[in-house]
Image (cartoon, rainbow, N blue to C red):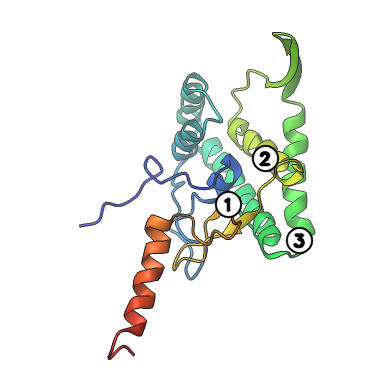
Amino acid sequence: MEKTKTIADIPLLGGHPALDFVNTVDAWRDRWGPDFLLCYEDLLAWGERAGLIAREHAERLRGEARADPAAAAEALDRAKALRRALHALFLAEAEGMVPAPSDAGELDAAVRDAAARRVLAYRSGTFAWQWRDDDDLDALTRRVAVAAADLLTARTGRRPVRECHGRNCGWLFLDTSRGGRRRWCSDETCGSHARVLRFRAKAPGAL
């Protein structure tokens, strides 16, 4: 019996946290879902795995969420709204389409909100952006928004975003292949499945 995937064990194949965030939905093509972000704690578990939030910070946010479940549910809804916009923005890039202004506006609003939560700090001989000590329930969503904006505006050494064309997939990933023609989020899963389907289609007696 196949084990049901959860937020704790879904593979991080996007090559960038913003794409891995979009990929917290199991499938965007052919069907939608299931959604791996079932509760606010799932969002934090993903954030820790993606390296966007430290464990100590996540624990504090878990405490905030348990103290106010309604506020945590609203914060999760905002995170999912951003995820939907990011999927549309990166998919438009992958397909060479013009993004919808509403999706760009969703990200822009999140980035503007995040701007007030960062400070430019000087440490060890260099300047770097750092996040304020913020226990607001939207803290992780703001970090995702900034990461996504950084990826969308990157110009040097930027690899293209691709959409996996595997059946019941549609995950997004940075194409780091040598030839720049990668088609699958994972050759071991979607790629292998596609080859099996092609073989069966060519088999004698196949419909």
Toward the left, the furthest residue is: 1
- Judging by the rendered image, the residue that carries numbered circle 1 is 178
> Marks 2/1: CA distance?
29 Å
Q: Quadrant where the N terminus lies?
A: bottom left
Vertical placement of residue 151 versus 93, above or below:
above
Nearer to us of marks 2 and 1 is 1
Residue 135 position, x and y percent, is: 59, 23
- Judging by the rendered image, the residue that carries numbered circle 3 is 100
Vertical placement of residue 102 versus 74, above or below:
below
Label at residue 204: none
Q: Residue at x 49, y 34 (%)?
A: 44
> Mark 2 touching mark 3, by CB under 8 A?
no
Q: Residues within 10 Å of mark 3 (few under 14, many from 20)?
A: few
Q: Which mark sits nearer the N-terminus, 2 or 1? A: 2
Residue 205 position, x and y percent, is: 27, 91
Q: Amino acid at mark 3?
A: Ala
Nearer to us of marks 3 and 1 is 1
Q: Residue at x 46, y 66 (%)?
A: 166
Q: Regarding mark 1 in the picture, which secondary structure is present there?
A: loop
> Marks 2/3: CA distance?
17 Å
Q: Residues within 10 Å of mark 1 (few under 14, many from 20)?
A: few
Please give left or right for residue 31 compared with residue 199 in the image. Answer: right
Q: Which mark sits nearer the N-terminus, 3 or 1? A: 3
